[in-house]
Amino acid sequence: MTKMEKPTTISRRAVLMGTGALVVSVGAPLGLDVLLGMNNALAQGTKPPLTPDQLSSYIAVNANGTVSAFFGKMDMGHGLFVAVGQIVAEELDVPFKAVKVYMGDTANSVNQGGASGSTGLQLGGKQMRMAAAEARRVLVDMAAEKLGVPADQLTVSNGVVKTIAPRGAMPKSVSYADLIGGKYFNVQLEWNKAYGNTLYAPGKAKPKDPKDHKIVGKPIKREDVAPKVFCQEDFCTDIKVPGMVHGRMIRPAVAGSVPVKVDESSIKDIPGAKVVWQQGFLGVVADKEWDAIRAMEKLKVEWSKVEPPFPNQAALYDHIRKAPVRKRAEEGKLAGNVDEAFKTAAKVIEAEYEWPFQSHACMGPACALVEIKDGKVNCWTGSQKSHFVQNGLSAQLGVPLENVHVIWQTGPGSYGRSDADDCAADAAALAKAVGKPVRLQYTRDQGTGWDPKGPASIHRARAAIDAQGNVIAYDFLSKGFSRVDVDTNGSKLFDTLAGQTQGVTLKSGDGFGVPAESYEFANKKTAWETIPPLLDRSSPLRSSHLRDPVGPQIHFASESFMDEVAAALNVDPIEFRLRYVKEPRDIAVIKAAAQKFGWDTRPSPRKGQTGAKVSGRGIAYSQRNGTRVAVIAQVDIDRATGKIFAKRFTVAHDCGQIINPDGLEKCIEGNIIQGISRTLWEEVKFDNKKVTSVDWISYPILDITETPEKIDFVLINHPEIPPSGAGEPSIRPIAAAIANAIFDATGVRIRRVPFSPDRVKAALS
Amino acid sequence: MTQKITLNVNGKNHTVDADPDMPLLYALRNDIGLNNPHFGCGLAQCGACTVHVDGVAIRSCITPVSSVGKGKVVTLAGLGTPEKPHPLQTAYVEEQVPQCGYCINGWIMTAAAFLAKKKKPSEAEIKTALEGIKCRCGTHVSILKAVKRAAAMMG
Ligand code: FES
Ligand code: FES
């Protein structure tokens, strides 16, 4: 285990020094002074400011010629750093192994938005590509000057710049290491002045033509698997600093209630145990972790009496139906006049779908370590948005941003705005109160019960059909809790439990979404409406981003509905989609999935199945920010028990250029499993006082015994189209594909997730 | 009240001064300083804290430290090393199983105890042996491939 002697992580300086060179290594063909004199404009020994407009903020060439890439996003387990390393190596013309990617450390990277919206490659990778291309251009210019040869007569391979010599002649050459190794680029980029996902700062260089790619597109393996299985790598839960104490939080049994009396004497026998109580914020610390746990359990607290804040769970969807609309938006590709068109319909098909609150339920509850020392703050967190945590802690603790160092360290899973951001802010509040570094880990019930939830929603769809069986109008409306009741990161105190429990002024945001597809109907309207949270402050049902925020719910509804229309018209579900889907890449994924699966064209439901066990197949398709996915599910249903076995999946996936096909497959695999889990099992349970699904029994997920037998992939590669994301798009159509397969097998349409055995059984009887 | 308890972990004796009711997990992580196993639930529901005691896979999050006695505790770090990996560790790397990797202790340690007793298990037997262990990232397909690969390596 890493016992951190000092609060250091790998700062950029340490990286450069650590690889052996002070400035230029001994034995290098040129002395430092010569080199500096020659290329003073482009390289320097001191570190330029860590700002987005500096090339050195992204790329450094070390003394030994290896390359460090500083990435302001991070990997959530999909091997993103491998893909980014491939891109950087490709553009720089260095071997893949020469590149090391550092992620999510505020001391050596700029705010590129953290892990967010499947933009790791789409936006983060794009910036790294431009930076690496610019670094190559600058290095070739330096070489041109040094070798006395025009830049256009130079080539690069394996980090060595060479003259293109006529046949038989000896080329002149110089390596990157000799040109700049161990010094920083001093090159200005054209920054668009944005931080986060949209940060973009290209240089003058043009990236390579994809047809020249040699490293991009290769199935390179992750190198972090071995360190993980041999326990050589720490998670954020493993970090320790000297003088550190352990913290635990205490949450109310009735949501919304606050402590009115705290009896500190109730824990006086526990060594070193202390209470931190600030309005609704209540935690304990102790020198030993077990003592902190005991203190949390033993502390006597009297809580304020409050009205139960929630409806009973059975009334959830009625509540959503009746709730006042806080914000409404019509989005997507709208066409014609839907209301007028419905007046002329020969037939109208309508349906309503329901999706519950869901929990991140990360593998472990969140953990963070915060150290406040000499006016400086260090924080180790699994939050997928470490730069925003830096903003948040700076505001919370009143410490200038440059004195707050946030280090992302792999956490126990992360699928969006989980409990990790709350944990960092809670740990900071504890650390400030007790004047010692605090490692705070939540409990399981806090992780599952108190994380920000994926919003619950209802979705209404209707289609107008003319006398010939054509769809002439389509109207789709989602109504639900906002996906940004608390925002997607911890940069604002009002978005954290620490802030909310300590009474800061609240600011709940509004956001939902519409189906992403290319169905063309003469009249089309897609809209959303958000409703206020059930409890505005410190709620265990506050809603935020959970993997593919609102995508699974919306497309469960919209793609189930397309199937309903196809069935009502007695048309094969794929044939129906192909009549109306217009974008060629969408058509291609649907056809590719059908072909790979061996789809037999016929309307659903399947005829002639008798007995307790029936099976069916269903398709669903969707887009997501440029990526398109078609999924076919084959399911077995036991009519007697209602148990569904999602047996086989075929996925056709087009995310533009594929950087690493193996990484992409693994990423899709995880999406499918988590998608099945959310469809078949996951539902936050609550009574009128609190969330009651607080562990793996009350919040079950897909078990290993339910693993699909087979997943087939069709990865469609478009090297000419810049990569769009893959971290989330394929979770989006899973629920609908399963629902459509159930309908195919049984003729019964299930419009409420999850499809737990009791619900399926009830629906079938 | 704390008491001195001697534990044999990964072949070495360690004496810890701990509340006898404290779960073994905290002794391993905090007193002995291992970064494996992990805390996932503290309820014996997820597997993240799994270690072997005399070859049996147990959940260290609910096992009182005083109950281990002279039992030999092996954690994932003691199962194999890069130089001498356990077949499951090799298979995990080959199959590129983990995403976040926080669940690894549960799967590998449970599967290791199972494969030590059961040669050439069927897929159904593997699944049953691993039932209830959690992986939230959804690496189920790859986990099964790795366990099958390791089983084949172990003959
Ligand atoms: S932490 Fe022990 S089983 Fe979950
Ligand atoms: S890999 Fe993240 S929980 Fe299994």
Image (cartoon, coloured by chain):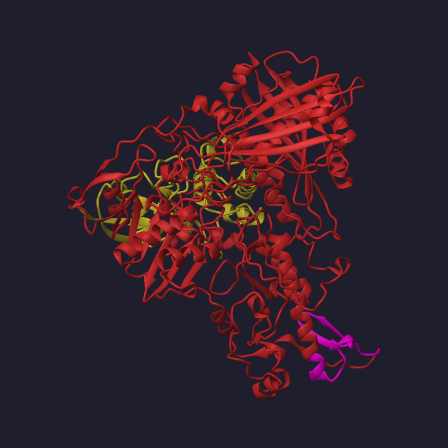
Chain colours: A red, B yellow
Residue A452 lies, in percent from the top left, at 44, 40
Residue B120 lies, in percent from the top left, at 54, 35
Question: Would residue A352 be seen by someone viewing this image from the given angle?
Answer: yes
Magenta range: A143-167
Q: Is residue A659 left or right of residue B135?
A: right
Position of the C terminus of chain A by quadrant:
top right
Note whether A380 is above or below A461 in the view shown: below
Find out whether residue A603 is within the magenta segment.
Answer: no
Q: What is the quadrant of residue A631 in the picture?
A: top right
Q: What is the quadrant of residue A140 in the picture?
A: bottom right
Residue A698 lies, in percent from the top left, at 41, 29
Q: Residue at x 56, y 73 (%)?
A: A62
Front residue of this view, candidates A722 and A287: A722
Q: Is residue A563 left or right of residue B94?
A: right
Residue A579 lies, in percent from the top left, at 79, 29
Q: Residue at x 42, y 35 (%)?
A: A541
Question: Would residue B123 be seen by someone viewing this image from the given angle?
Answer: no
Find out whether residue A163 is within the magenta segment.
Answer: yes
Note whether A96 is above or below A543 in the view shown: below
Front residue of this view, candidates A585 and A213: A585
Which residue sits furthest right?
A167
